[in-house]
Image (cartoon, grey):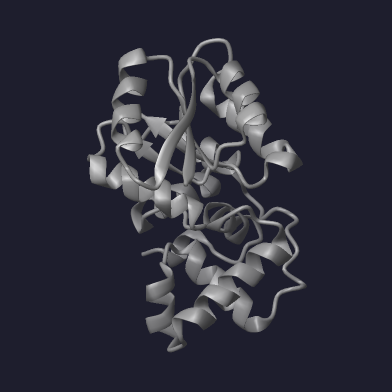
Amino acid sequence: MIRVLLADDQVLVRAGFKALLDAQPDIEVAGEAADGAEAVRKVGELRPDVVLMDIRMPLLDGLAATRRITDDGGLRDVKVVMLTTFELDEYVFEAIRSGASGFLVKDTEPDELLRAVRAVVAGDALLSPGVTRRLIAGFAARSKEPAAVSLAELTEREREVMALVGLGLSNDEIVRRLVVSPLTAKTHVSRTMVKLGARDRAQLVVLAYESGLVRPGWLG
């Protein structure tokens, strides 16, 4: 059973999400929070699998709340999905950098919301190639030099796979690009995340750019 915490200051939004999620045989709403501070507290108490976190909330916004959750080593397995009103929300870049596994627009289709919840639990990031391009463009605008991220522990193949993840390719696309089996692609991605201490694919995208492995000019 996938346990979800809903963090949004709008009662009707939480009610709508709760009705949809609780109707699924493999998902349950473990709790609700009306602000970021309450969300952080309840994550510690309830240990949900996924937090659907609104970016703009009183007392403590969703971005700060996400940082507190992802910075807590004891909560490393908790996945945070940011909820935004617009896809181009100015805070999406910082949300991913803060440790969020992805983001969803609030008016997303019900099936997409359910797919997203299941996807982050499975270890996938909610980052389409278009979103990845914006993220890397954001890094380019904010950083003149790559950060000190060491890839020394990675094999040549793992670096190649990490670069493709950084460019927004899915595992299936990596399989076709490198002509390897699905299990091999998944194993390379998993080992790369473990070696670099990345929470998920979203953070791997961040590290791919910060290390200089991926550069904006490659995106076309």
Residue 132 location (% of width, % of height): 43, 54
**Relative to 205, residue 21 above or below:** above
Image-based side of 111 in relation to 92, left or right:
left
Place residue 71 in its image quadrant.
top right
Q: Nearer the viewer, residue 176 or 25?
A: 25
| Residue at figure coordinates x 65%, y 69% from the top left | 192
Q: Residue furthest left?
A: 109
Quadrant of the drawing holding the C terminus: bottom left
The residue positioned farthest toward the bottom in the image shown = 179
Q: Residue at x 63, y 47 (%)?
A: 77
Residue 106 seen in this snapshot: yes
Q: Residue at x 74, y 41 (%)?
A: 74
Count of numbered circles in the view: 0
Q: Quadrant of residue 182?
A: bottom left
Q: Residue 13 placed where, x, y %?
A: 32, 21
Q: Nearer the viewer, residue 10 or 18?
A: 18
Where is residue 193 shown, x and y percent of the image?
A: 64, 63
Q: Is residue 87 visible?
A: no
Classify 130 as above or below 56.
below
Q: Position of residue 88 (x, y in %)?
A: 35, 36
Q: Residue at x 70, y 53 (%)?
A: 147
- Looking at the image, which residue sits at the far front? 25
